[in-house]
Image (spheres, rainbow, N blue to C red):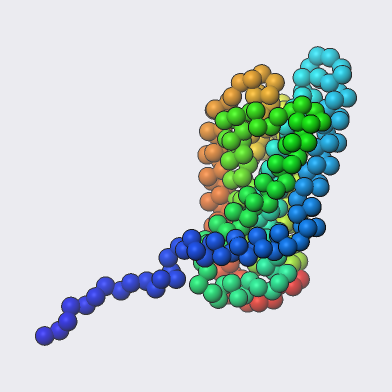
Amino acid sequence: MTRPSTPMHSPPYAAFSPRRVFAMVLRHWYLLRSSWPRVFDLMYWPAVQMLMWGFLQTYVMQSSGTMARAAATFVAAVMLWDVLFRGQLGFSISFLEEMYARNLGNLMMSPLRPAELIVALMIMSLIRLTIGIVPVSLLAIAFFGFNLWALGLGLAVFFLNLFLTSWAVAIFVAGLLLRNGLGAETMAWGIMFLLLPLTCVYYPVAILPGWLQVFAWMLPPTYVFEGMRALVIDHVFRADLMVSAFALNAVLLAIGVAGFMILLRSARREGTLLQGGD
């Protein structure tokens, strides 16, 4: 008499593990808190940008009419741009830290799954951004009387959309780094600036040439910055713009994750995971 076959179970390490995610977050948190220059850098550049654009806003608002109304959005725009830029950079820097330490090969041979690594770096992106944005938002209140947090529900929706975009871009860049090594490092630092003119951070989409507006409306942050101007200038929350931004972000995030997985498989096949150099 044969024993009934028992179903095959995946080993414990095959399932998504919050403990492994927490371990990765803890590793990068210890690295961050043990280095005051790293913490200082998270606050320094956002503060410089906010002060520069804030003083420009104050100067332009001394005029009258449409120009003064448009200038009222400068501080809000630069702070939301920092959410987009620093969200991507916070993810990418944490990933680069692993490359600098030549630790990626070890991580990929461990039970850590790619999805767990991505989630851990997303959490570190949030932590890094919080360290930078909270002091800067307080400076904005002290210097210019602008309270970012007074935007309420609109601010939460803006933040979420910008995070999704920044993570989608950062995940794809991480794949490029896996496949091409540190020779692609400049992509981590500069790729967001390719979007800066098209996402209409400091001016409305209507300013762009007609043919360029088509490309601008293909980018989720464009809807966020248009929504921010509507909220700050006209005190109207544009839910239609936010729904469109979420839909585009879902597509962008799917492309970013798919690109990362394809590039990861290619890196494993070509052996670039263990190189880590240029």
One can see residue 145 in this view? yes
* Residue at x-position 58% and y-position 25%: 238
Residue 163 percent coordinates (x, y): 61, 45
48 relative to 171, above or below: above
Q: Residue at x 81, y 46 (%)?
A: 45
Above or below for 125 versus 112 = above
Q: Residue at x 11, y 85 (%)?
A: 1
Q: Quadrant of residue 157?
A: top right
Which residue is nearer to you in this view: 6 or 38?
Answer: 38
Comparing 237 with 147, the one in front is: 147
Q: Is residue 122 left or right of residue 208?
A: left
Work out whether residue 240 or residue 132 is closer to the camera in this orientation and state it.
132
Kindly identify the residue that appears in the image at 54 percent across and 61 percent down: 22
Rendered location of residue 134, percent (x, y): 70, 41
Instruction: Answer whether residue 203 is visible to the viewer in this image.
Output: no
In the rendered view of the protein, which quadrant contains the C terminus? bottom right
For this orientation, the residue located farthest to the top is: 65
In the image, is 73 to the left or to the right of 20?
Answer: right
* Residue 154, percent from left and from top: 59, 30
Give residue 142's quadrant in the image.
Answer: top right
Against 24, residue 150 (above or below) is above
Q: Quadrant of residue 268?
A: bottom right
Image mark count:
0
Residue that lies at the very extreme toward the left in this rendered image: 1
- Place of residue 156 in the rendered image (x, y in percent of width and height, measured from the top left): 58, 35
